[in-house]
Amino acid sequence: MAKIFCIANQKGGVGKTTTAVNLAAGLANLKQRVLLIDLDPQGNATMGAGINKAELDSSIYQVLLGMGDIAAALQTSESGHFDVLPANRDLAGAEVEMVELDQREMRLKQALAAVAGDYDFVLIDCPPALSMLTLNGLCAAHGVIIPMQCEYYALEGLSDLVNTIKIVHGKMNPDLKVIGLLRVMFDPRMMLSQQVSSQLEKHFGDKVFKTIIPRNVRLAEAPSYGIPGVIFDPSSKGAQAYIAFGKELVERIAAL
């Protein structure tokens, strides 16, 4: 059965989608069967995987509202070699439409039950807010991977997210836990980055992944070509870091 992980952070612009897409490609490169779920109405993970969100006949929107089957909505990232449950702007309306539905926070979990056995990893790219969509992701997942920049405001947002995870764990999903914190967009030349990184290691110990993702131009360029960064330029420092992160994640899960 698949290990289901949310890539989540309530702060925007911290590299959630970059992490989700490149981790998916990195795990696929390690011969893992991977499904990437785009739970953000912006559809950036969909586009980053090389799928045109404007041409979708079916998406996660139909799946969540019970208007379509998850298997029919799945697409394949040709470059990344993983499957995608795509999203587009239609998903923005799901927030309001799901209010009237029974077990509205469990819709994704229920839908995933049909395909979870086909994958080793399911990665959920969550929107940067504690919304009904994010709640669906947290209720469906076994754990949360938190990408964060090593800067002051990121620490404040982290405490809010950890509290949210504790609430969901206590009331809705007892399987949910923090898998680890991933330091992203790291610039070793900045003293603040090094200080925050040290604080994270001190307070969270082995919950902090050893792999550090550097700030990297090639990772930033890749989405405009619809190709994951680890495929776009495998020799870049960013790509190599995400492949190393994929290996570390597989090892960490095997040890649990």
Image (tube, grey):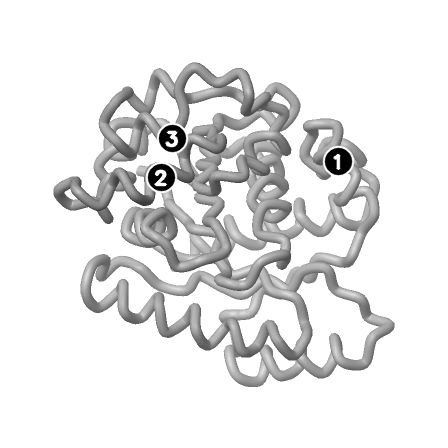
Q: Nearer the viewer, mark 1 or mark 3?
A: 3
Give how far apart the Cα atoms at labels 2 and 1 are: 27 Å
Q: Residue at x 69, y 62 (%)?
A: 212
Quadrant in the rendering for residue 92: top left
Q: Which mark is residue 2?
A: 2
Q: Name the amino acid type tagged 2.
A: Ala
Q: Nearer the viewer, mark 2 or mark 1?
A: 1
Q: Residue at x 51, y 78 (%)?
A: 204
Image position of 169 with respect to 37: above or below? below
Closer to the camera, 80 or 135?
135
- Going by the image, does 73 lie left or right of 203? left
Q: Name the amino acid type tagged 3.
A: Ile
Location of the N terminus (image quadrant): top left
Label 3 or label 2, whichever comes before in sequence order? 2
- Going by the image, does 95 lie left or right of 253? left
Q: Which mark is residue 222?
A: 1
Closer to the camera, 38 or 91?
91
Image position of 123 with respect to 204: above or below? above
Q: Name the amino acid type tagged 1.
A: Ala
Q: Which residue is mark 3?
A: 60
Q: Residue at x 48, y 35 (%)?
A: 36
Whole-percent x, y for residue 249 in the image: 53, 52
Whole-percent x, y for residue 123 in the image: 46, 42
Location of the C terminus (image quadrant): bottom left
Mark 2 lies on a secondary structure that is loop
Give how far apart the Cα atoms at labels 3 and 2 are: 19 Å
10 Å crowding of disc 1: few (<14), some (14-19), many (20+): some
Q: Nearer the viewer, mark 3 or mark 2?
A: 3
Mark 1 lies on a secondary structure that is helix
